[in-house]
Amino acid sequence: MVKGSEMPNANSFQAFFDETSSYLTPQSLKYDKAFNQFSNRLLVQSFFELLDASESKTFLELGAHRAMASRHFMRQGNEHFAIAVEANPYNFEKFRENVEKGGTIYKNMALTAVSGPISLQLKDHDRARKRGHTSTSNSLLKRSGFSEYKEVEVRGITFDDLTSEAVAAGEIPPIDQEPPVVWIDVEGATSQLIEGATQALPSCLAIMVEVEAEPIFVGQVTVEGVDAQIRALGFRPILRDCEFHPRQYNIIYVNERLLDESIVGPLIDAFETACSEFDGTEA
């Protein structure tokens, strides 16, 4: 196993950010949105390559919406397990049939620091009502500068409780035997999720998480704080994109105890090369 000092980008968050910025920022400034979106597609591709290389069989998608990542994962293997968690009950009812027919287990819950009922903040302007309150951008937190909300009570559950219940129900294998991979996109509430994940997350293989460099939601913990929480549980960042540069992006973290350089190193090299060689077109 690789020790922390040997893991790529294993120092401070700022060191990781500066290293990745050295090849992302020039391309983002030159090609703008075309490169930013390319970097996101490449990061997602790299995440699934990581899962393939590590032969991961369990996928947990938190803040799932249509659960596209889980559905893709389930198509890749016959012995795969996927749970997609979506807090918005309107999204859940709209997408449930399509999600479940591919074998993904779809749950209407919100990931929280403490299990129990919690209020989800749904945008409640005219357009939101016309769309039946289905959206990707609702949160447990209120968006800064926005005042029209509809509160909906949903079941809140910690990641620790989610995984223990899923194992007990036979929905996924024991996580200490088949370490899951985790996809997190919970609209500013990542810090609360991590607070409720201190027992189970250290048994997971890798994480892909959406982060914000500056607050979008009231009371939100931004990337430096989230990074410190995730690192404290035994993970290190290896790659990031610049999807919505510079305010919002995604980071891949790997478990130092479970993944080694033979998997991580080539993935980092291939990602950096592809980003550096981007010329405004894609093959």
Image: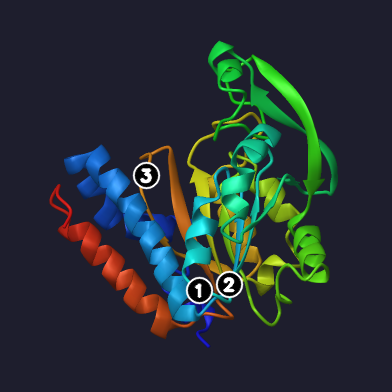
Q: Is residue 216 above or below residue 86?
A: above
Distance of label 3 from label 1 (alpha carbons) = 28 Å
Write the residue at 35% across / 72% down.
267
Query: Horizontally, is 95 left or right of 89 in the view?
Result: left
Residue 25 appearing in the image: yes
- Picture coordinates of residue 167 (x, y %)? 78, 70
Q: Earlier in the sequence, mark 2 or mark 3?
A: 2
In the image: residue 23, left or right of residue 130: left
Label 3, secondary structure: give it: loop
Instruction: Please tell me which residue is depicted at 56% across the width and 42% down the height of the picture.
Output: 222
Q: Dot 2: within a 10 Å radius of its alpha carbon, few (fewer than 14), some, or many (20 or more) residues?
A: some
User: The disc labelled 1 sits on which kind of residue?
Assistant: Gly
The residue carrying mark 2 is 80
Tell me, yes or no, whether the two marked residues, 1 and 2, touch with CB atoms within 8 Å.
Answer: yes
The residue positioned 31% from the left and 52% from the top of the image is 39
* Structural crowding at the residue carrying mark 3, measured as other residues with C-alpha within 10 Å and reported as few (<14), some (14–19) or many (≥20): many
Q: Earlier in the sequence, mark 3 or mark 1?
A: 1
Q: Which mark is residue 148?
A: none
Q: CA distance from mark 1 to mark 2?
A: 6 Å
Distance (Cα) linking label 2 and label 3: 28 Å
The image quadrant that residue 47 belongs to is bottom left
Name the foreground residue: 149 vs 260: 149
Q: Which residue is mark 3?
A: 243
Residue 119 rendering spot, x and y as whole percentages: 78, 32
Residue picked out by circle 1: 77
Circle 1 SS class: loop
Three-letter code, disc 3: Glu
Q: Quadrant of the C terminus?
A: bottom left
Eyeballing the image, is 103 above or below 88? below
> Which residue occupies the foreground of this view, 207 or 94?
94
- Secondary structure at badge 2 equals loop
